[in-house]
Image (cartoon, helix red, strand yellow):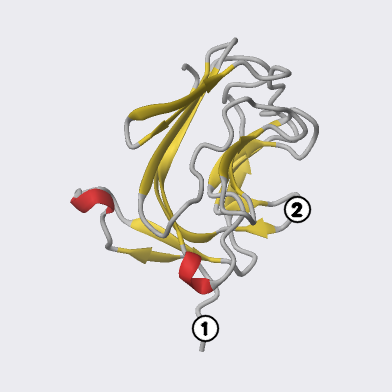
Amino acid sequence: SPHNGPTFVDEYPYGGTHPRKVLYTHHEQYANNQAWGIAYANKPRTILGYFKPRISHGTCYNDPFGYGAGHHRAAFYVHIGSNRHVSLDYHGVDERINHIIDPVQEKWYHIAITWDGTYNRAYINGVKVKEGRPSEHPHTFSYNYGYVVVGGAPWNNNDYDGWIADFGIFNRA
């Protein structure tokens, strides 16, 4: 029978010795918690982590990780679109660094995205690949309605299908 929950696996990105990974299997599962104390509104921040989408299972889209809420400019998420483009998503803004990976493949990526108060920057596997000044500053929710999410975006039921490891959010660029 199919497995309907996250699975901890012992596959290491890039042959490293990272902690165990979590496999999300696109069945309405994700981990979330309120984003108290995380960079909110227009404050500097960095989100980063490893991810490996499961393209071989058909659809490859949705959100490996990020935080915020489902309102205009209220989020800061890594998003994989149905066209297999990896992007930063605030909701309804031109972030000016998309598409970060085009197209994404079924392999491990380390992604780091920073906002310093003026520019978004995206790094893949330690190399800066994009930099841009967004059309509008983020206004990310972290109190009341903001959530940290790993494995999806709960406000629109877009569950991620793939592996995630070593996700983090920092209150600095």
Q: Which element carries disc 1, helix, strand or loop?
A: loop
Where is residue 109 shown, x and y percent of the image? Answer: 38, 46
Residue at 28%, 61% in the rendered image = 11
125 or 163, which lies in front? 125
Residue at 75%, 53% in the rendered image = 156
From this view, report whether residue 92 is shown above or below residue 157. above
156 or 144, which lies in front? 156
Where is residue 88 shown, x and y percent of the image? Answer: 59, 35
Q: Residues within 10 Å of mark 1 (few under 14, many from 20)?
A: few
Amino acid type shown at disc 2: Asn
Mark 2 and mark 1 lie on one chain; the one further toward the N terminus is 1
Q: Is residue 91 left or right of residue 150?
A: right
Q: Is residue 150 left or right of residue 40?
A: left
Q: Is residue 54 left or right of residue 91?
A: left
Residue 105 in view (yes/no): yes
Amino acid type shown at disc 1: Pro
Corner quadrant of residue 151: bottom right
Q: Is residue 34 left or right of residue 86?
A: right
Residue tagged by mark 1? 2
Q: Which element carries disc 2, helix, strand or loop?
A: loop
